[in-house]
Amino acid sequence: MSLRNLPLEEGIEALCTLPGIGPKVAACVALFSLDQHHAIPVDTHVWQLATRYITPELSGERFTPKLSRNVSEAFVKRFGKYAGWAQTVLFIAELSSQQAILPQHLQSTKATKSKTKLEELIDREMEV
């Protein structure tokens, strides 16, 4: 049977049986290659995004496999069947290399505690 035809969790389980493949890489493969648009590859960077924008109640918690699943579920609940792509856009927007090409009013400023315009836009989107 094709991995593409399996439910997401079964596909990730099957991929994790391969040497060197863990849940994050398996979720990446599912998202980018198996048409599982709701797969969320959670790592420490995505964890930081999630606790900032999606699940602030988890801020300060230790990153664990169970909480990784909670983050995935929260992204899917918020963004639906294309949650994996929404997570990807948020992740890329936070990269310093991408900050340089954003209009200045959307760029992150790590030196200040106030929210950037990008963070405000994400917050407004999260309220919808």
Image (cartoon, helix red, strand yellow):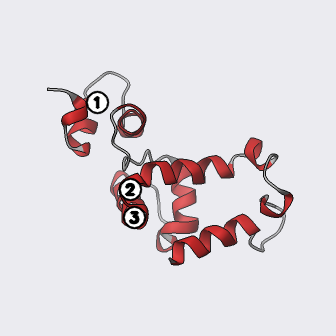
Q: Residue furthest bottom?
A: 127
Residue 36, above or below 119: above
Residue 77, above or below 29: below
Residue 4, above or below 67: above
Q: Which mark is residue 74?
A: 3
Name the residue beneath numbered marker 1: 15
> Which element is circle 1 on?
helix
Q: Amino acid at mark 3?
A: Ala
> Which element is circle 3 on?
helix
Q: What residue do we see at 36% from left, 28% from top?
A: 21
Q: What residue do we see at 53% from left, 47% from top?
A: 88
Q: How many marks?
A: 3
The reply to whether residue 106 is in sight is: yes
Residue 125 placement: quadrant = bottom right
The reply to whether residue 59 is in sight is: no
Does the residue at mark 2 contact the one at mark 3 (Cβ under 8 Å)? yes
Q: Amino acid at mark 2?
A: Ser
> Which element is circle 2 on?
helix
Residue 19 placement: quadrant = top left
Q: Residue furthest left?
A: 1
Q: Which mark is residue 72?
A: 2
Task: Measuring from the top left, give residue 120's x and y in whole percent.
Answer: 68, 72
Residue 80 placement: quadrant = bottom left
Q: Residue furthest top?
A: 19
Where is the N terminus found, in terms of image quarters? top left
